Structures are given as C-alpha cells and as structure tokens.
C-alpha cells in the first residue's frame, strides 16, 4: 500500500511539473493595442484569439518589445481592446492574405475553473497523500 501511495505521489508530482512547464512556455507578453495594430497592418500576425476585450495570439516573426525598461523579443502576445468593437474578427481577417493567412478564433469568456482544477488538484492530492502517510505512520 505504501509503495502504491508513493508511486501515485511521484506521478502527480511529475504531472504538476509538466503542467507548470507547459504553462510557462505559453506565457504571453503584454503589448499595447497600437503595437498590435501595427503588426497586424504589416502582416505579422499568425494567430489571433479574441475573448471579450482580451486579444491573445502569436506573431509570424518575433517582435521586439520593451517591458519595464527591458527590451526582449517575443512571439506570443496579449493585449486589450480599448473598447468593444463589433465583429473585430472581421477587421482582423481583412488583413489576411493568401501568403499570410491569419487563424482567428473567437472565444467566449470563461470562468477559469479548468485552470484551478488542472493546477491546484495535484497540490491538493499530494497534500492528502502526505497526510495519509503521516497519519498511518503515527
């Protein structure tokens, strides 16, 4: 029984580390709306996802941005619309060409229960397994 619990703890730990690394890999750099529009007009958009006022996506080529005085290149970005623009996806698609198509997704805003479930469940399970082992030992 103890080996089974330890095996489960190891698997949950590995899963939690993988989820953390994947999340860090997808980290999006905040950019200004004007920077977003400049890159859109230059044809540097690869993928855009719109959810209410939030826009996230990926550039075709890295863009140099300055954040808190530090300059760095980024492919993944996030920005916020200054106000609600009806059918903003159509505005983005106008800039798409055959040579530079843009993948546009419109998402419904969601409560982040999946985030809570995926990232905090392993911590909760590890804590419970630790308590079970500790109480069985005493």
Image (tube, rainbow, N blue to C red):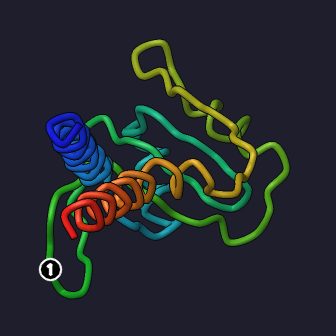
Front one among 91 and 14: 14
Image quarter of residue 68: bottom left
| Horizontal side of residue 26 vs 55, given as left or right | left
Outermost residue, top direction? 98
| Horizontal side of residue 7 vs 81, given as left or right | left
| Horizontal side of residue 103 vs 63, given as left or right | right
Whether residue 123 is visible, yes or no, is yes
At 48% from the left and 12% from the top, the residue drawn is: 98
Per the image, the residue denoted by label 1 is 70
| Horizontal side of residue 122 vs 21, given as left or right | right
At 62% from the left and 54% from the top, the residue drawn is: 113
Residue 125 against residue 101 in the figure, above or below: below
**Structural crowding at the residue carrying mark 1, measured as other residues with C-alpha within 10 Å and reported as few (<14), some (14–19) or many (≥20):** few
Which quarter of the rendering shows the N terminus? Answer: top left
At 52% from the left and 51% from the top, the residue drawn is: 117
Q: Position of residue 32 (x, y in %)?
A: 46, 70
At 32% from the left and 59% from the top, the residue drawn is: 132
Q: Helix, strand, or loop for circle 1? A: strand
Front one among 136 and 125: 136
Image quarter of residue 46: top left
């Amino acid at each position: 029984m103890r080996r089974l619990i330890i095996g489960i703890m190891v698997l949950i730990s590995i899963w939690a580390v993988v989820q953390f690394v994947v999340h860090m890999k997808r980290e999006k750099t905040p950019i200004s709306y004007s920077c977003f529009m400049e890159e859109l007009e230059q044809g540097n958009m690869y993928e855009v996802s719109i959810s209410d006022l939030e826009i996230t996506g990926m550039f075709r080529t890295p863009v140099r941005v300055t954040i808190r005085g530090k300059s760095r290149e980024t492919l993944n970005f996030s920005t916020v619309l200054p106000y609600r623009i009806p059918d903003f996806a159509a505005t983005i698609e106008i800039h798409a060409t055959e040579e530079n198509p843009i993948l546009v997704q419109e998402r419904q805003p969601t409560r982040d229960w999946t985030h809570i479930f995926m990232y905090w469940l392993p911590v909760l399970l590890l804590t419970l397994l630790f308590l079970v082992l500790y109480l069985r030992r005493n």
